[in-house]
Amino acid sequence: MQDLRPTLRHARPCDRDAIERLMRRSVRTLCTRDYSARQIAAMEREFGFGRLDEALILDGTYFVAEIQGAIVGSGGWSRRTKLLAVRDDDTGLESDLPHPPPGKAAIRAVFVHPEMAGRGIGRLLVRAAESDARKKCHDAFEIAATLTGVPLYRKLDYRTKGLFSFGLSGDGRFAFVLLSKRDGEHGLRPAAPAQRPAGPDAESPAPNG
């Protein structure tokens, strides 16, 4: 019998093309219940949504999940003071983005292959990122998630802090949800979830960060 359990390893620079293909496929498939195809295309065209921040790989804080050698998920964390990078240079965007407070780790760029959604891969990646960040003395975490990714993070004890969005040329706005958690706060009553269209609570991608 074939072993179809995912295995994790640190991402390497040579993985970047495969990771970005996964990211684009994930967003274009899983996010369509919360965003229109035009919104997704505009984010890719205007802000480079679907491109990986290579600093995550170079910092050694980004992971890939593989099944039989194929990358089926990716995600990690950052010690850098930003939650989201949607364009290579971030020109004109950095001042508008929320930043995690000092001591908080940003969970970044968690994506799952659409055919593998709901199988625990997203949870595995987030837990690995949190565990790795704890080894660097971080005990609090923040994530800028797509609307589609919110159910996964709420299951992992993240609480909604607020919403922010990017204006799109002729296509309205593209919204993200800011969530956070701190170790030891799992018993707290979670904040009210962000408003989103009804749909099943399947694992879904977070934004490119």
Image: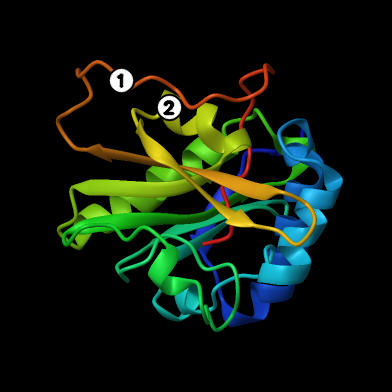
Q: Is residue 83 above or below residue 188?
A: below
Mark 1 → mark 2, Cα distance in angstroms: 8 Å
**Which residue is depicted at the point 44% across and 44% down?**
126
Q: Earlier in the sequence, mark 1 or mark 2?
A: 2
**Residues at discs 1 and 2 in contact (Cβ within 8 Å):** yes
Task: Say whether residue 109 is visible.
Answer: yes
Please, is residue 99 above or below residue 189 in the view? below
The residue located at (67%, 16%) in the rendering is 198
In the figure, is residue 62 to the left or right of 6?
left
Q: Residue 13 in the image: x percent, y percent?
A: 59, 81
**Residue 30 at x, y = what percent?**
75, 38
Viewer-side residue, 54 vs 4: 54
Residue type pointed to by label 1 = Pro
Q: Which residue is mark 2?
A: 154
Q: Quadrant of residue 189?
A: top left
Task: Tell me the quarter of the picture where residue 87 sits.
Answer: bottom right
Q: Give the quarter of the figure containing the N terminus.
A: top right
Quarter assignment of residue 34:
top right
Instruction: Indicate left or right for 76 with 185 as reference.
Output: right
Q: Residue furthest right?
A: 37
For discs 1 and 2, the disc positioned in front in the rendered view: 1
Pinpoint residue 2: horizontal percent, then vertical percent: 76, 38
The kind of secondary structure element at disc 2 is: helix
* Residue at 39% in and 38% down: 162
Label 1 Cα neighbours within 10 Å, binned few <14 / some 14-19 / many ≥20: some
Specify the label residue 14 is tagged with.
none
State whether residue 70 appears in this view.
no
Query: Residue 12: x percent and y percent?
Result: 56, 76
Which residue in the protein does label 1 denote?
190
